[in-house]
Image (cartoon, helix red, strand yellow):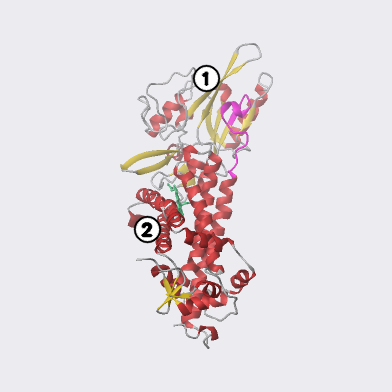
Amino acid sequence: MAKTLYIDTSKCMGCRGCESACKQWNDLPANIKGDLKGEKFEFLPFNGTYQTKTAFAHQTYTMVKMQELAADDGGVKWLFGKRQCMHCAEATCMMVCPVDAISRTPEGAVYLDKEKCVGCGYCVQNCPFNVPQLDYNQKGIGIWEKKSSKCNLCADRVQNGLIPACAKTCPTGAIKFGDREEMLALAKERVEQLKPKFPGARIYGEKEVGGTVLYLLTEHPGYYGLPESAVVPWQVRFWKYFARPVGELAVGGGLLVILAGLFFNYVMPAKETPHHAEGVK
Amino acid sequence: MAQPKIGTLRNGKVYRFDPVEVAAHWVHTISFFALLITGLVLFAPGGAGWLAKLLGGVNVTRLLHRVFAVPYALISLPLLVFFSPRGAKEWFREMFHWDKDDIKLMMGYFPEILGRHADLPEAPKFNAGEKFNSLLTLFTGIGLTLSGIIMWWPQSFPQWLVRLAYPVHDLAFLGMCSMLCVHIFLSVAHPKMRAALEGITTGWADAEFCKEHYGKWYKKVVTKG
Ligand code: HEM
């Protein structure tokens, strides 16, 4: 049964309880000392914003992004957008993974199995939302064991009838988890409610990536750091549907030439010696 | 001891390549094979899992691939250009110079691969197949090196370029492998072309073979010495 994580940004007050709940359930270290790769700083940075996490990292599957906007009445508007893996319907990471470490759960989540991951980084390079990040463990000089990591939509919880940790902990009801139709209906209703006060209100994620994560945004997606249209990068399609198959076909052709050459020279050689080969040993 | 002049005929053999040309060929061959084997693990970590184990795991293979990339990119071409300018000049001129005879030879060569006779025009120092192989080696080499550098340090390049580097690296790698099948078959297994292997290994190739397969070159440069 297809499930959906629905995030109503108009109800988010930026408490970041979801960030903590995510770390707690998934057993991810906090980055207080700032020495974890992916998010390096000497002290907890003060950068004039309520946003504490600057980027996804192997120990950060979710974060609340914050943006200040000038309001028409001269004041400021605060936009909060809780971000995590979008669990795209056509998932680029799944397309590029060379070891099938990324698969789809029956509930619709894009699941990354760290046991199978070999750390090639293709999902990291190609994700249109830049979500997966590598976890580095040094094994020797120049040798790194790498593992990709990202939100699995608490697949272990969901399979046991629970809802994801972020949705469970959200105190304002900004994060909900349920059947897709139900969540979509909620979002549509909410857009109508908000339209008079927030003309920019819209649903994001239904068409863009297929609806496993739905957003209700009050402004243009760009303010939340979301791409206006998120599609599989053309380089990935070129790679997967042209470069690899055509190249493999060419190598297959080369191997056939070897087989044919061996056969026609040694098993079934020409009857008469070619006249121009006389004298050649 | 003074090196013989290219084209010198002695004891039924012709001096075809100087030691620098021979060295450049084999440095390239060895580093290419090392990159091919380690690259195969990165190309198909699942299917080539046994190979990864042999090399010490995917993480070690990633390092090895980078190590072998250095001689591949930095040794063979400069070696040829700086230490055998004559050899480099000949090679470049041949691979970029195509006339009607070359095209005819290229089109009609397939029966020869199968050990059948085809009426083919005479070839210069490198025949059309070797010219094509040279072009592919040069251009896939450039493509593999540039895309490889981008893949090595992805943080230093724009994301669209990093994403493009992978299909370019793969296409060049697979294209070169395809050519390599034919190249290796002709040089080690083909009853007649095998003689060329001696030329690129010792520098001296059988005179009859040269007359037969590089007729234009033979007439122009070979002198009794
Ligand atoms: C200067 C030359 C080269 C450089 C700098 C280079 C560098 C790289 C790098 C950095 C990677 C990514 C490895 C990773 O996942 O960490 C890679 C992958 C790879 N390389 Fe190279 N390489 C070079 C030449 C070659 C050659 C000559 C071949 C083949 C004959 C080759 C075959 C491959 C293959 C098959 C992959 C895997 C790509 C994929 O999975 O799609 N490379 N190379």
Q: Secondary structure at mark 2?
A: helix
Q: Residues within 10 Å of mark 1 (few under 14, many from 20)?
A: some
Residue B212 position within the rendered picture, expressed as x and y whole percent measured from the top left: 52, 78
Label 2 lies in ligand 1 vicinity (Cβ under 8 Å): no
Residue situated furthest top in the rendering:
A74
Q: Mark 1, mark 2: which one is toward the viewer?
A: 2
Which secondary structure is most common in the magenta stretch? Answer: loop
- The disc at residue B93 is none
Residue situated furthest bottom in the rendering:
A272
Does residue B47 appear in the picture of this structure?
A: no
Looking at the rendering, which quadrant does residue A229 occupy? top right
Q: Is residue A227 magenta?
A: yes
Quadrant where the N terminus of chain B sits is bottom left
Contact between marks 1 and 2 (CB within 8 A): the answer is no
Residue B65 position within the rendered picture, expressed as x and y whole percent measured from the top left: 40, 51
- As measured in the structure, the alpha-carbon distance from the residue carrying label 1 to the one carrying label 2 is 53 Å
Q: Amino acid at mark 2?
A: Leu
Label 2 resides on the chain identified as B
Residue situated furthest left in the rendering:
A140
Does residue B204 appear in the picture of this structure?
A: yes
Q: Is residue A264 magenta?
A: no
Q: Which residues are magenta?
A: A215-233
- The disc at residue B51 is 2
The total number of labels drawn is 2
- The disc at residue A13 is 1
